[in-house]
Amino acid sequence: MALSKPILVVLFIQTLYTGMLLLSKAAFNVGMNNFIFTFYRQAIATIFLGPIALFLERKNIPPISFKNFWQIFAMSLFGITLSLDLYGIGLTYTSATMGAATTNCLPVITFFLAVLVRLEVWKIKTAPGIAKLIGVVICLGGAMTLALYKGPSIKLFSHPHLLGGLDPAANQPPQSRTHSGPTWIKGVFILLTGNTFWALWLVVQARIMKGYPSKLLFTALSCFLSSIQSFAIAILVERRPSQWMLGWNVRLLAVAYCGIVVTGVAYYLQAYVIEKKGPVFLALWTPLGLILTMLCSVLLLGEIITLGSVIGGILLVGGLYSFLWAKSKEQIIIPSTCSTVIEADKEGLEFKVIEGTKNSPSIV
């Protein structure tokens, strides 16, 4: 029973993330501007998390220096605002399935950036080091397959898409469910670029959190700053009032779901799983989100699954598991008097930095 509860929770988390991708793609399909979507998502997340953070931390609110504030501002710009904007553009050019597939690259990208900034030591001649190299190469192969090879279509269901009609105010049909070769390739690499920005934020966030240790207030402040930044970008790109109208449709449902359910509920559920079973256990279930998204996108969005998507997805999952196996065999160690363990969750909502003595590091 002790094991079954974390499993049920992690299954629920993957279901929540599947809903995020499907609703986001559905909103884009009916013509919602992805920059406006990012603003509304972050604004709702701020409204939801802000009061909770202030209430829970009201007696222990740490002071914030000018330096810390601008560090958080910069990281919110690159790691949240631009990352979400790029991810939204990539989704409009590709599919919900592709968004879920490229997410499997996040742990690998984060590791690679951690090596570049010397937060991680990559011992290439050891068995875990070789496994990491294999995982990176396989993930790169999967990403290239997704971008450059489509192959024949795989028809799983003969069913009209169900989310396309949830926006009666939209006077244009949903965007085409198939995309030209150049558009598809561009979309895949934009998704990967968005993931790279997010991974960079995860790496740098570790150092910023040392100066501002309240994770809940840090998250709420990041969402607030990101909402301001995303509004500035969105108003420059789109000034037509009609595009800012939500109404009782899939647009409102998508931004409310992403802002409250993903940023709020999923955040705490992930923290629970990491506390009980560790970050690797959580990451092991990431490919389930790809499978759920692939099946649901066909049924609900009418997306077409291609052989290239299946092969690329399998390669990404294989590379991820090779990388995670290596991660389970060694720790991220900074050459100093203490050891630091760093783990990033699937959606980048939490970056775990746990310090201990060199002989007895602490892992949660």
Image (tube, rainbow, N blue to C red):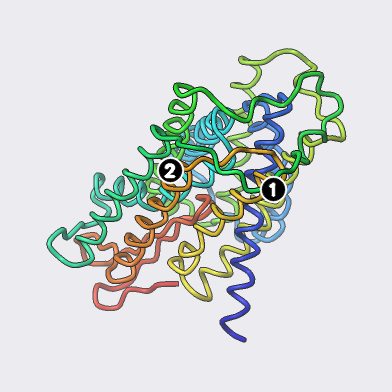
Could you tell whether 130 is left or right of 149 in the image? left
* Depicted 145 relative to depicted 167: above or below: below
Residue drawn 45% across the image and 72% down it: 364
Amino acid type, residue under disc 1 in the picture: Gly
Of the 4 image quadrants, the one containing the N terminus is: bottom right
Query: Quick check: can you spot residue 46?
Result: no
**Residue 224 image label:** none
Amino acid type, residue under disc 2 in the picture: Trp
Q: Earlier in the sequence, mark 1 or mark 2?
A: 1
**Residue 50 image label:** 1
Q: Give the secondary structure at mark 2.
A: helix
Residue 306 picture location, percent across and down: 51, 40
Residue 3 picture location, percent across and down: 56, 81
Residue drawn 60% across the image and 58% down it: 14
Residue behind mark 2: 201
Residue drawn 40% across the image and 61% down it: 353
